[in-house]
Amino acid sequence: MTTEQPTALDTPALPAPRRAPSGSSPSGVPRRGFLAKAFGVTAVLSAAGSALGLLRDLLLARYFGANQGTDAFLVAWTVPETAAPLLIEDAMSFLMVPAFALALVLREERPDGPDPVRQLVRATLPWLLLALSTLSLGAALGAPQLVELLAPGLANPGLAVTCTRITAITVLPFGVAGYLAAALRAHHRFTAPAGIYVAYNLGILGVLLTCHGIWGVRSAAIGVALGSLLMAGLLVGPFLRGLRAGTARRGRGRRSRNTLVLIPLALLPVGAFTLTRQAQVFIERYLGSGLPPGTISHLNYAAKVSQLAMTAGILIVTVTFPLVARALAAGDLTAARDRVEKDLGQAAAVVLLGTAFLMACAPSMVALLFERGAFGPRDTAATAAVIRVYSFGVPAQALIGVMIRPYFSLRPVVRRAGDPRPEDGGRRLLDWYPAGAMAFGLVVTVTVGLLATPRFGALGLAAGNAAGITTTAALLLHGLVLRGIPLRLPRILGGQARLLVAAAAAAALGAPAAGLTSDPLLSTALGGLTVLLVFAAAGAGLDAREVRGPVRTAVRAALRAAGPGRAPNPSPVADEGKPPHGC
């Protein structure tokens, strides 16, 4: 195992595994049925993890409300909030999934030689554990300085320091969980990695339910530490079983160079983007620490609710990203472009529908979810107002999630020893384009926040967040074209505009409908139904492809259910000349 400086390639030099586990084709690419099952399990477990996370936030609001204690905990929560995307979701995955995949190829090409997968583990895991342990210890020892840096105006910095030292433990198990999850996914094992957030939130909920009366808000910090240990523990067994079982497989492969070269510095652009994206949270908590106690908590609750709409859109990309990555690896930029354009449209449709619902029903929804225990009507009003401002940036958040995956899938992280190293040209600078776009968005966030916060308080912070992330999304859309994916921008922007008009109409009519009753459940139901019907009608009327297809399918299904012979036969020329849509 060797390492070298990062090299930018036009397409990843990563062949697909020759033979995969049962349920896969001989070429190593899982059959459609296997992938559908894997994605279904991933979606179900991801939804379960999100539901448990929402329950976690409900309990935090019920037990502790929104005050200086919850503000202190949320500052401490910055550590796991930063570590999770860096060590589990983004950077670690982009580095280690291709590395393990190539090691599997080399294992099959030399079945009688040393196991490249074990070589990769021996070469990387000890150093990773050392680095993670150092970071975890450093975060714990530097907790006072970290709290002062993140929230200098915090009302209870001592509690924040204590909670930060507890949550610093998460750095090590988060990194281990990300590493093991990458290895398992490369082996086409998806169930255990999809369940890590279920284990994480169960750990938090267990401690909260049993110890909130004893330890107060510290119980939440202890629960976070316990949940992180459960995440890593969930993956250790499947990883070891897969490592042992893999050595028994034999595949037939061509002779090739047998040394794997890992390029660890390729992590830097991904890590820089992830950290600059997470810096929006730092900015909010820094500026929010000087506002009245409870402001950071209102921002946190609002962000968690707003992100539910974004998560629904990102699930679409989770399913389709392997198709984009495979097309890019094969050099088929046309297929990658078509898939990315569809993903942008479909994710926008789902997220804008959710955004219209948030705009229309925020007060009743917050009251329904949070208003109990220590969380009172004033907290409901403040959180609902922030949600409505946050919602302006939710579509951009989702679109960034769509665009960043194909962008970084062109970033090489492993290669075979002896493979020719292509000329870099200007590609290396483009590796840093997402981080630069995010940094520019942060400048917008800070500028708007500083100008608006003195007058509007938390709403000014939320407006800065929305403005900054929207700026970044616009820059990344241009960056994909620079990267070599020939997106048809007029078509994309036209589709987004139609969906945006439909969402605006739905929110405008849904808000009065939600206001017809003071009962939170009935208000949310009336507003949500109105938003759905208006969005469907307006989207279909505006000929938005992502809405038109599902509406026609729903109408035909309703007509068939109403009686035989009532469903119209789809005209074979109804959509003649129109571009395809949907998955």
Image (tube, helix red, strand yellow):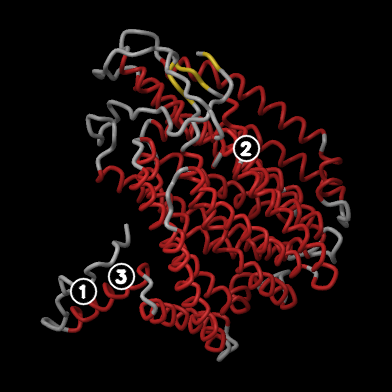
Mark 1 sits on what residue?
A: 574
Mark 2 sits on what residue?
A: 271
Mark 3, residues whose alpha carbon is within 10 Å: few (<14), some, or many (≥20)?
Answer: some
Q: Nearer the viewer, residue 182 or 68?
A: 182
Residue occupying the point 50% across, 73% down: 500
On screen, residue 19 above or below 405: above
Which numbered disc, 1 or 3, marks the residue that appears first in the sequence?
Answer: 3
Q: Nearer the viewer, residue 207 or 398?
A: 398
Label 1 residue SS: loop
Label 3 residue SS: helix
The answer to the question of whether label 2 and label 1 lie on touching residues, with beta carbons closer than 8 A, is no
Residue farthest to the bottom, as pictured: 516
The answer to the question of whether label 2 and label 3 lie on touching residues, with beta carbons closer than 8 A, is no
Mark 1, residues whose alpha carbon is within 10 Å: few (<14), some, or many (≥20)?
Answer: few
Label 2 residue SS: helix
Mark 2, residues whose alpha carbon is within 10 Å: few (<14), some, or many (≥20)?
Answer: many
Left or right: where does residue 574 sit relative to residue 536? left
Q: Nearer the viewer, residue 353 or 242?
A: 353
Mark 2 → mark 1, Cα distance in angstroms: 47 Å
Give residue 384's quadrant in the image.
bottom right
Mark 1 → mark 3, Cα distance in angstroms: 12 Å
- Looking at numbered disc 3 in the image, what kind of residue is underneath it? Gly
- Looking at numbered disc 2 in the image, what kind of residue is underneath it? Gly
Q: Is residue 215 visible?
A: no
Which label sits on residue 40? none
Residue 200 at x, y = what percent? 56, 45
Give residue 538's quadrant in the image.
bottom left
Q: Is residue 531 visible?
A: yes
Which label sits on residue 549? 3
Residue 560 at x, y = what percent? 18, 78
- Looking at numbered disc 1 in the image, what kind of residue is underneath it? Ala
